[in-house]
Amino acid sequence: MTEEINMALEEAKDQMSQAISHLTTELQKIRAGKANPSMLDSVTVDYYGSPTALSQVANVNTLDARTITVQPWEKSMLDEIAKGIINSNLGLNPQNNGEVVIINIPVLTEERRKDLVKKAKAEGENAKVSVRNQRKEANDYLKGLKDDGLAEDLVKRGEEEVQKIVDTYTKKIDDLIALKEKDIMTV
């Protein structure tokens, strides 16, 4: 195949890999009833007037499967950390004991688990849409090469390669969603 086709395939792979990375990040935000420090990755706190990531002002650890502790580097940050966790809309209720912020992760109800599975599947569908958009862009580029005089059989072969790549990434997305669904539904 020509260099232009190979470049188009590589670009499509890169974009699809980014869709997988984004999906992985989004799935980590969906809690499965088990305490995980990454649940607080999106939390920002007011650190002397500027919004700062929680991980830059405190240590975030798990005490056990249902408890996250946040140990600030400065005790004066305890109230700001608690406020930041509440404002993050994660549905968590932090408790400040004067030393650390303790977050008890509630047990998920069956209904809530099903809602979280739906949310995970929606994120998976968004990733698949992104992959399909990349397929369309790659195929449009290949058709443009055909219009510029590239042999039709090379274009067809390129489109087949694009479809193989799409199938691979779609399978990866399905696998990630199945894994997350199993994680969420495990009591």
Image (tube, grey):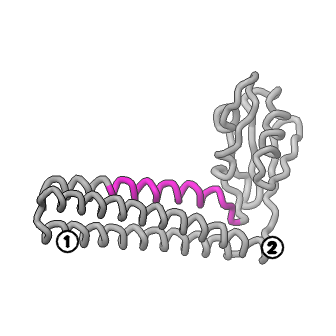
63 on left or right of 4: right
First of labels 1, 2 by sequence position: 2
Tell whether position 125 is magenta: no
Q: Amino acid at mark 1?
A: Lys
Alpha-carbon neighbours of circle 1 within 10 Å: few (<14), some, or many (≥20)?
Answer: some
Looking at the image, which residue is at 71% across and 38% down? Answer: 44
Q: Which residue position is annotated with label 2?
A: 109
Q: Nearer the viewer, residue 43 or 10?
A: 10
Secondary element at image label 1: helix
Residue at the farthest front position: 147
Of helix, strand and loop, which mostly describes the magenta segment?
Answer: helix
Asked where in the image residue 120 lies, by quadrant, the reply is: bottom right
Query: Can you identify the residue that label 1 sits on?
Result: 156
Which of 144 and 14 lies nearest the eye of the viewer? 144
Give the label, 1 or 2, closer to the camera: 1
Based on the displayed image, in which of its 4 quarters is residue 97 positioned?
A: top right
Q: At label 2, which amino acid type do we have?
A: Thr
Quadrant including the N terminus = bottom left
Q: Position of residue 88 (x, y in %)?
A: 76, 46
- Who's the residue at 31% across and 71% down the image? 163
> Looking at the image, is 158 positioned above or below residue 104?
below
| Residue drawn at x 75%, y 22% as measured from the top left | 48
Foreground of the two, 45 or 160: 160
Range drawn in magenta:
12-32
Q: Is residue 164 left or right of residue 116?
A: left
